[in-house]
Image (tube, rainbow, N blue to C red):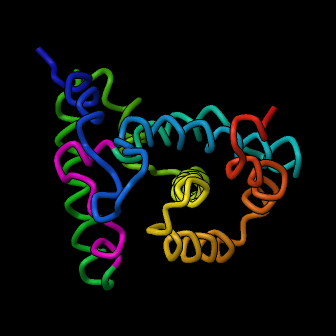
Amino acid sequence: MFHFFAYISRLKYISRWSLMRNSVTENVQEHSHMAAVLAHALGVIRRDVFGKPCDPNACAAAALFHDASEIFTGDLPTPIKYFNAELEDAYRHVENAASQKLLDMLPGSMRPAYESLLLEDDPEIRKIVKAADKLCAYIKCVEELAVGNREFSDAARVTAKALEQMQLEEVSWFLEHFGPSFGLTLDGLG
């Protein structure tokens, strides 16, 4: 008996943004879905708008599993995870050990297909997934601010700056063409 997918299904029990007052709570499973949607979009933009090689489907699949290790580690808040290089490196080792534990819950014949997803071994896909992850955070901030939750003011500013520092034209293009919609009401989207 293999428990891989039973563990993956438990991502819905892990809350995100635990240090922040949220108007709408978010769990890791919901976040992983949105990260996959955005990673796919960034891949399409890279390939179809900028004419660079990219497999949007591979980006989406990697994003679906990018936080799978949090089944064992929980969602460590960003200020803690990136407090200093030593802590960041130690947490990366913990994440890798958790990912390996998940891989060990698969039949041997299936492990290679999931290893590249859980360990994000392609540097170009890793960049897209990281950008999608950061975009998710920024969108969360924009949505919270749109309903008057000032708790996310600083996070929005810091996250926008981090996105800018990534210097990925796909991200800039996405934000220019799709970003403003996230602050609108349902009627405003109409």
Picture coordinates of residue 176 (x, y %)?
A: 83, 58
- Using the rendered view, name the quadrant where residue 20 is placed: bottom left
Note whether 33 is above or below 145 in the view shown. above
Q: Nearer the viewer, residue 131 or 181?
A: 181
Q: Which residue appears at 23% of the width and 64% of the height? A: 93
Q: Nearer the viewer, residue 88 or 100?
A: 88
Note whether 24 is above or below 1 in the view shown. below
Picture coordinates of residue 10 (x, y %)?
A: 23, 31
The quarter of the picture where the N terminus appears is top left
Q: Is residue 5 left or right of residue 44?
A: left
The quarter of the picture where the C terminus appears is top right
Q: Is residue 69 left or right of residue 63?
A: left
Note whether 74 is above or below 85 in the view shown. above
Q: Which residue appears at 27% of the width and 55% of the height? A: 75
Q: Which residue appears at 31% of the width and 42% of the height? A: 68
Inspect this view and state whether residue 55 appears. Answer: no
Q: Is residue 162 left or right of residue 75?
A: right
Picture coordinates of residue 145 (x, y %)?
A: 57, 61
Inspect this view and state whether residue 35 appears. Answer: yes
Q: How many numbered marks appear?
A: 0
Picture coordinates of residue 15 (x, y %)?
A: 28, 47
Q: Which residue appears at 35% of the width and 60% of the height? A: 21
- Using the rendered view, name the quadrant where residue 187 is placed: top right
Residues shaded magenta: 68-82
- Using the rendered view, name the quadrant where residue 14 is placed: top left
Q: Is residue 178 magenta?
A: no
Furthest residue toward left: 1
Q: Is residue 108 left or right of residue 52?
A: left
